Image: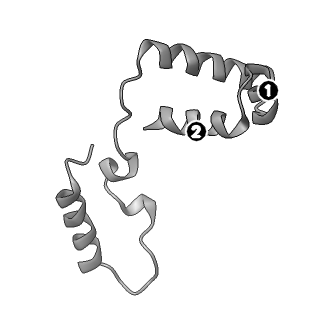
Amino acid sequence: MMANVTELAHVVRALAEHRRLSGPVRRAELPDPVREGPAARPLSPMEHAERAAILEALRRHGGNKARAAAALGIGRATLYRKLRGYRR
């Protein structure tokens, strides 16, 4: 995982110094820690249970988020917010 913003700045500077005028930097050109992004935070037991229920509802409803949210009794925006939160 990237140690900090300074380390990321060094990566960007190195890429800029060695960059041709051939276009934007592609993801594949970045070091693994940069491509992987920040490590996910550990989930609480309640978040694990909630995430499992959401994933099961999504599976039962063929990935349809609106139907999964309705089955769980939450709004679609809440479902999206919770899914984003599990990735951080």
Left or right: 13 as drawn, with respect to 78: left
Identified at 33% across, 49% down, the residue is 32
The colour scheme used to paint the residues is one colour
Disc 2 residue type?
Answer: Arg
Residue 51 horizontal side relative to residue 55, left or right: left
Q: Residues within 10 Å of mark 2 (few under 14, many from 20)?
A: few
Task: Determine the residue located farthest toward the bottom in the rendered image.
Answer: 21
Identity of the amino acid at label 1?
A: Ala
Q: How many marks?
A: 2
Residue 56 appears at what percent x and percent y?
69, 18
Q: Secondary structure at mark 1?
A: helix
Residue drawn at 65 percent across, 33 percent down: 79
Relative height, residue 48 to residue 67 (above, below): above
On residue 70, the disc is 1
Viewer-proximal residue among 35 and 50 = 50
Q: Is tag 1's residue or tag 2's residue first in the polypeptide sequence?
A: 1
Work out whether 38 lies above or below 23: above
The residue labelled by disc 2 is 81
Q: Indicate the quadrant where residue 12 lies.
A: bottom left
Q: In the rendering, at what x and y percent does residue 1 appear?
A: 27, 43
Q: Nearer the viewer, residue 21 or 61?
A: 61
Residue 70 in the image: above or below residue 39: above
Q: Nearer the viewer, residue 87 or 82?
A: 82
Q: Secondary structure at mark 2?
A: helix
